[in-house]
Amino acid sequence: MSEIINQPPQEVLSDYSMPSAEEITAVEAMLEATESIIVSPEQRAKMWNVVIDQIRAERAKGERG
């Protein structure tokens, strides 16, 4: 299953620019921690979106502050 986790779902790529290595690493860690409860592609895509949004918000806050 890990080969599936390591690639952003197509739903993510259509809504976002390609995630950075930092973003992919953070999402992979989150998905591995919750792998047993994430069952559908929609849930996986939502997880990618949520984590990438959090990382980008933190980065933007750091750049401003």
Image (tube, rainbow, N blue to C red):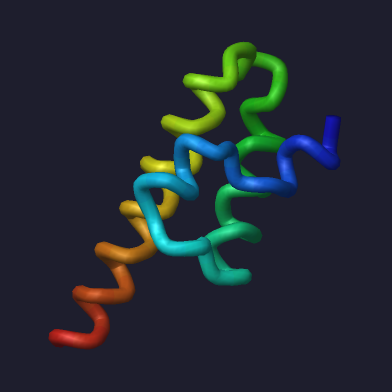
In the shown orientation, is residue 57 left or right of residue 11? Answer: left
In the shown orientation, is residue 23 left or right of residue 32? Answer: left
In the shown orientation, is residue 8 left or right of residue 5? Answer: left
Residue at image x 32%, y 53%?
53
In the shown orientation, is residue 57 left or right of residue 29? Answer: left
The one of 9 and 63 positioned closer to us in this rendering: 9
The one of 12 and 25 positioned closer to us in this rendering: 12
Q: Position of residue 10 (x, y in %)?
A: 55, 39
Which image quadrant is residue 35 in? top right
Residue at image x 69%, y 47%?
7
The one of 19 and 55 positioned closer to us in this rendering: 19
Residue at image x 66%, y 34%?
33
Q: Is residue 48 above or below residue 62?
A: above
The furthest residue to the left:
64
Instruction: Name the quarter where the N terminus is drawn.
Output: top right
Q: Position of residue 4 (x, y in %)?
A: 77, 36
Q: Is residue 9 above or below residue 63?
A: above
Which image quadrant is residue 2 in? top right
Q: Is residue 38 above or below residue 30?
A: above
Q: Position of residue 38 (x, y in %)?
A: 60, 18
